[in-house]
Amino acid sequence: MKKWIVFLLLAASLLGLTGCASEPSQAESWDRIPMVMIDGVLYLDTGFENTNIRECGLPDGEITSTVDGSERPTKDDQSNFGTGYVYQYGTEGTVEIRINDRWWIYATEEARENLQFPDR
């Protein structure tokens, strides 16, 4: 009797799994690395903060539009992490974006490969 119960439970489990596999799956989307497009160039978050920044007057620009975190920005002054953040140009291939009163370094893919940051 126990064998039949175990067999029936196993069969029901397998049928349940088969039913799940035949259902159409929903497309999954994943958040991308934070990025912003400025003057047609895409800058990606480096994860590093510039603690030595000297604000020189007015910022160079502001992020005015946003796309979903799973998308890449396609327009100037557009990010995938929000709006209202000001930025200024940094060294070649970088911009610094003020988020919560801290300046975060964003860089082009090429500049990201060449940047050297101190150990954390």
Image: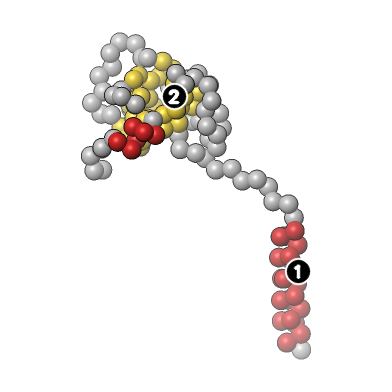
Disc 2 marks a residue whose amino acid type is Val
Disc number lying in front (2 or 1): 2
**Comes first in the chain, label 2 or label 1:** 1
Can see residue 66?
Answer: no
**On the rendered structure, is 47 left or right of 30?**
left
Q: Is residue 20 above or below residue 3?
A: above
In terms of image quadrants, where is residue 16?
Answer: bottom right
Label pair 2/1, CB-CB below 8 angstroms: no
> How crowded is the residue under tag 1: few (<14 C-alpha within 10 Å), some, or many (20+)?
few
Q: Residue furthest front?
A: 110
Assign the N terminus to one quadrant of the image.
Answer: bottom right
Query: To which residue does mark 2 refer?
Result: 41
Circle 2 sits in a helix, a strand or a loop, which is it?
Answer: strand
Q: Where does label 1 land, which residue? A: 15
Disc 1 is placed on an element classified as helix
Indicate the quadrant containing the C terminus: top left, top right, bottom left or bottom right.
Answer: top left
Rendered position, 59 above or below 32: above
Q: Nearer the viewer, residue 84 or 94?
A: 94
At a point 39% along the width and 34% down the height, the residue shown is 109
Amino acid tagged 1 = Leu
Q: What is the x, y in percent for residue 107?
A: 36, 30
- Which residue is at a point 30% across and 36% down the rendered structure image? 114
